[in-house]
Image (cartoon, grey):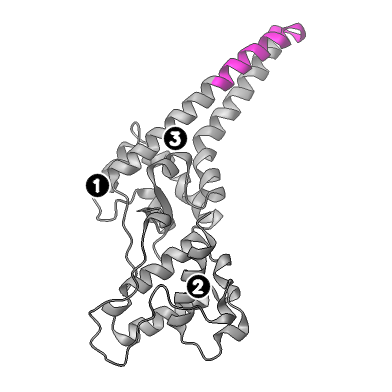
Amino acid sequence: MPLSFALAGVGSRFVALAIDTVIQVAVGVAVLIVVLFSGGALAGIGASVSQLWAAAIFVAVIFLLVFAYFAVFEIVWNGQTPGKRVAGIRAIKESGRPLTAAETIARNFLRIVDQLPGFYGIGVLVALLNSKNKRLGDFVAGSIVLRETPFEKVKPVWTSGRSTNPLVAPVQVDAVTPPALQGAGAGITIEELALIETFLHRRYDLAPEVRSRMAEQILERVKDKVPAEAASGLSTETILESLAHERRNAGYS
């Protein structure tokens, strides 16, 4: 059973796009003003040459604004642009892992098609016609855009009364972290914390074999951040609980 995420709606994605567009336009206007003044300063070398240089610089900047803005920010900010950050949404793989640089570039290259015939007409239409609000770029990269809730505002509840097995003794959030794991969670990223806590929230709804397999897969993903000696004698879920608990204690930056 796959992990589920709170998908960003078309409305929140539109808000993020509108904010990014305003930023792009503002930067474009500022560059145009600078280029015009620079063109005047270069008039001494010939009007035609100065105009050519000014036009070339302006076209290059506009190209970068239109085609590189989204990809660069999403690579550097792990799936977010300024607009997405304000709107509280993020692009990730459907599996829950972050997008690679190549996937991010491919995802944003399709904006050339998505924005046709004007202001993302095709992108909005495609998003409205599928249950995951995906545009063409998302289908190419295998990505989704999720809605984020700040982790400092979320109180983790990892236990559930649905478990009917009296032998199961869920570890509470305030349980003592095993000494070997103390401080280990500091290296966990926010995205990895989201993945771990999504599993911990849902584990009692999963079939035992699915639950065990998912726990092992998640631990495999973060195993390089777990001291080798820490895994000895501890269950996979206890390690995940401890990592999440320690990560929260380390803060949210």
Residue at the spot 33% in from the left edge and 61% down from the top edge: 5
**Sequence order check: which comes first, mark 3 or mark 2?**
3
Viewed as shown, does residue 2 lie left or right of 128?
Answer: right
Quadrant housing residue 12: top left
Disc 3/disc 1 C-alpha distance (Å): 21 Å
Which amino acid, by three-letter code, is at mark 3?
Asp
Residue at the spot 54% in from the left edge and 69% down from the top edge: 185
Residue at the spot 41% in from the left edge and 59% down from the top edge: 142
> Which residue is the site of mark 2?
243
Disc 3/disc 2 C-alpha distance (Å): 35 Å
> Which residue is the site of mark 1?
128
Residue 1, image x, y percentages:
31, 75
Which residues are drawn in magenta? 30-47
Which amino acid, by three-letter code, is at mark 2?
Leu
Quadrant housing residue 11: top left
State which mark lies toward you, 3 or 1.
3
Which amino acid, by three-letter code, is at mark 1?
Leu
State which mark lies toward you, 2 or 1.
2
Neighbor class of circle 1 (other Cα within 10 Å; few <14, some 14-19, many 20+) is some
Secondary structure under the numbered disc 1 in the rendered image: helix
